[in-house]
Amino acid sequence: MLTSLSIKNYALIDQLQVRFEQGFTIITGETGAGKSILLGGLSLILGKRADLSSLKNKEQKCIIEAVFDISNYKLESLFKTEDLDFEKQTIIRREILPSGKSRAFVNDTPVNLSALQTLGKHLIDVHSQHETMQLVDDEFQFQVIDALAKNGTSLEMYQSQLKSYKKLQKELKELFAFQAEALKEQDFNTFLLKELTEANLIDGELELLEEEFETLNNVEVIQERLTESHQLLQDEEVGILTTLTLLKNNLQKLANYSTTYNELYTRVNSSLIDLDDAFAEIESLQEKLDADPDRLVVVNNKLQLLHNLMQKHVAENVSELIEIREALTEKVSVTENMEETIHSKQKEIKAVSDKLDSIASKIHENRKKTIPGLTKQLESILQDLGMPNAQFKIEVNLGEEYLHHGKDQLSFLFSANKGGQFNELKKAASGGEMARIMLAIKSILAKYIQLPTIMFDEIDTGVSGEIAHKMAWIMQGMSETMQVFAITHLPQIAAKGNTHYKVYKQDIDEVTTTNLVKLSQEDRIVEIAQMLGGIEVTNSALAHAKELLN
């Protein structure tokens, strides 16, 4: 509910600070006194765009601030979605700067107009004869029926399943697209994979094959050099090993004379041991070395194959070729198993679809059971509001498409006259009739769900007498469970309020300002008497006013 409103430097208002209470609040005032200014200021809080014409003093900023008690509104999830701090006493502030820029804050957090508009819909519902388009909206009509049908929990379950259904449908569509694209490449990928698989790739193999190729391709030269090296080491007269052995024996005889000779002997002996090992390895290599033309052909062919594959796949080594082979294996495998994957996804969708059908059927049946009672209530209320021949023809038909509100197609038809044809509300009802229908619907809704603060803006235009009394009773009844405001010119409605405010203009130093004042009981009597009989208050008007108030 709206607990307070502060307006500074807006239109004809210098500064206004007012607190509001729960229940039925009346706002009255002469035509042109500024009731529309209050609504205009409130609309800025609800996210309406602002301009410099809103500023009373063009050199100062305009500030409008409203405090709402939202402890019973269940808006925690909305605040979380909008990334706002939830406070039971929520403060919304709007500022319009002399530069023309506008700023908005919710609990001191800056917000854009979109967030303000989203939040505003849950806080205040401004209702006038010219703003009844909500009535012809399917979503609103379903909201009315579902509130009476107590479909809230079922709708939450349905929408949760619908979210899953849409996600799965999107995934299936992507699978089909992937499959179509993959099938175009399947034959080529399979060929490439076969080629890489048959190559029997081994990491590090290229370097080993290149070394083996060099050896086999130069076997004669290698054999010649090994033989020559063997002779140089082992010749009986001038071989290196023979000479080094003599040198070692000679130095051994000096080793005992000093550490210097001993170290020299040790170094020569170590060299002799190394050369002995080298000689043994040369003999071993000579034994192993053998010309093998067939093996040379095999090695050469494998090298050519590897180099061709590396060039084809733009790979720098066999390791990269192996990675490409593994990627192709996965691609081919995924494509080959795609039918199974698609079938599995279709089974998931079918399971969710069955759940949706079940919940939608339950919602549909609840709506069908509720509609006769809703129709009866609406026609009864409208009869009291001077529309004795008003008739509704409301039908829900279960369709095939999954919609946000279920699978129902809604037909919400109206006839204002006896024997008249049923038609859509916007075609069958006048502005005044639409206002009364909305009042009837909102009064019914108030019994079933927590509605935001509602402000009826002169919906009683063209109404008088007993119908005005009926309207007042309906509004008063609604105010038992919610906060209701009524801007009115009718004394019958004004008398039913719990609290009464008057909007008035006054001229100070040749400057006109608009003010709002809460009326005492005595002031209310005078105000209602003036509404009954004009500025000149008569005793009979005062007596009538007291009668209405009592």
Image (tube, helix red, strand yellow):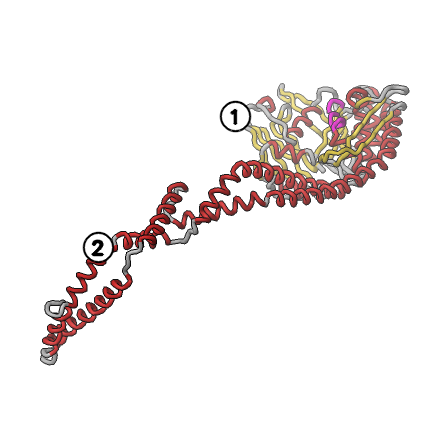
Give the residue at x 64% y 43%.
Answer: 86
Residue 222 in sight from this viewpoint: yes
Image side of residue 492 versus residue 211, left or right:
right
Name the quadrant of the C terminus: top right
Q: Is residue 142 visible?
A: no
Do the numbered discs 1 and 2 sit on residues whose CB atoms are within 8 Å? no
Q: Inspect the magenta stretch and tell me whether residue 135 lies in it.
A: yes
Compared with residue 341, is residue 204 higher up or lower down, i.e. above or below? below
Q: Residues within 10 Å of mark 1 (few under 14, many from 20)?
A: few
Q: Does residue 218 appear left or right of residue 397 in this picture?
A: left
Numbered disc in front, either 1 or 2: 2
- Sequence-first disc among 1 and 2: 1
SS for callout 1: loop
Tell me the quarter of the picture where residue 377 sits: top right
- The residue to which callout 1 is attached is 99
| Residue 248 spot, x, y in % from top left | 13, 74
Among the 4 quarters of the image, the one containing residue 408: top right
The numbered disc on residue 313 is: none
Q: What stretch is highlighted in magenta?
A: 129-137
Residue in front for this viewpoint, 437 or 195? 195
Given the image, on which type of amino acid does mark 2 rest? Answer: Val
Q: Is residue 486 left or right of residue 330?
A: right
Quarter-wise, where is residue 348 in the image?
Answer: top right
Q: Is residue 482 magenta?
A: no
Q: Position of residue 116 (x, y in %)?
A: 63, 34
Quarter occupied by the N terminus: top right
Q: Residue at x 38, y 43 (%)?
A: 308
- Image vertical order of residue 60 relative to residue 231, above or below: above
Which circle marks residue 221 in the picture?
2
